[in-house]
């Protein structure tokens, strides 16, 4: 093999390796950017939920952090509670639309499951579940179906637990 041919082969090999390296760096940067974007979305939503909880604490007379629903709210309290529920549905819908996918990476699935836990927690409240039909008017149909199924499941489980406690008070 001549010296010129060897230099040509080495040069072409270097070009191919450089191109492969550039594609690898691009792919790695793209993946990192998507992961960072997912985390930023989750962080923004978490901040919105934290702000919501601060409002709930500021309206402690509504008893939204207690497990038992307070049945004797006046009209003004009902209006504030419903406004807070609307804020909450808005946060949950944004989380659903931005994070929930049929196919999710392990990391996205972990982020989404934390939101699903929040949704389940609120759907256990009978006042929240009762307000869902009104709250979900005009919302994304897939989200409305999703949270409706969760509410139904959680209320069924809650009813079963209540019935068991009623039949066996020591089970509470």
Image (spheres, helix red, strand yellow):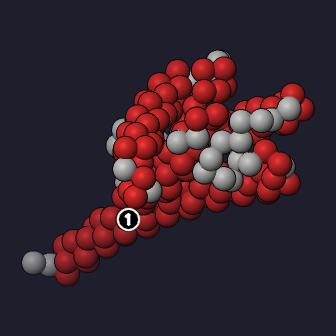
Note whether 62 is above or below 50 in the view shown: above
Q: Would residue 73 appear left or right of 137 to someone viewing this image?
A: right
77 or 43, which is in the foreground?
A: 77
**Farthest right residue?**
76
**Farthest bottom residue?**
3
Q: Residue at x 54, y 48 (%)?
A: 121
Note whether 72 is above or below 26 in the view shown: above
Classify the position of the N terminus by image quarter. Answer: bottom left
Image coords of residue 23 (percent x, y): 39, 61
Image coords of residue 129 (percent x, y): 57, 31
74 or 24, which is in the foreground?
A: 74
What kind of element bears circle 1? helix
Q: Residue at x 65, y 27 (%)?
A: 131
Q: Is residue 62 visible?
A: yes
Q: Residue at x 43, y 43 (%)?
A: 166
Residue tagged by mark 1? 24
Q: Would residue 28 appear left or right of 8 to someone viewing this image?
A: right
Q: Number of callouts in the render?
A: 1
Image coords of residue 164 (percent x, y): 37, 45
Q: Is residue 33 visible?
A: no
Image coords of residue 102 (percent x, y): 36, 38
Q: Would residue 123 appear left or right of 10 to someone viewing this image?
A: right
Q: Residues within 10 Å of mark 1 (few under 14, many from 20)?
A: few
**Farthest left residue?**
1
- Quadrant of the image occupied by residue 137: top right
- Quadrant of the image occupied by residue 101: top left
Classify the position of the C terminus by image quarter. Answer: bottom left
Q: Residue at x 19, y 77 (%)?
A: 6
């Amino acid at each position: 093999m001549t010296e010129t041919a060897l230099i040509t082969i080495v040069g072409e090999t270097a070009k191919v390796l450089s191109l492969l390296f550039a594609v690898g760096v691009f792919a790695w940067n793209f993946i990192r950017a998507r992961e960072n974007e997912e985390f930023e979305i989750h962080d923004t939503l978490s901040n919105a939920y934290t702000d919501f909880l601060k409002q709930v604490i500021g309206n402690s007379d509504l008893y939204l952090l207690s497990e038992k629903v307070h049945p004797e709210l006046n009209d003004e309290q009902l209006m504030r509670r419903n406004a807070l529920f609307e804020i909450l549905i808005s946060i949950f819908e944004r989380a659903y639309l931005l994070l929930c996918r049929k196919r999710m990476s392990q990391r996205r699935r972990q982020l989404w499951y934390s939101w699903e836990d929040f949704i389940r927690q609120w759907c256990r409240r009978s006042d929240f579940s009762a307000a869902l039909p009104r709250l979900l008017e005009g919302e994304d149909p897939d989200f409305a179906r999703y949270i409706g199924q969760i509410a139904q499941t959680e209320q069924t489980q809650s009813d079963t637990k209540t019935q068991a406690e009623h039949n066996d008070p020591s089970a509470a």
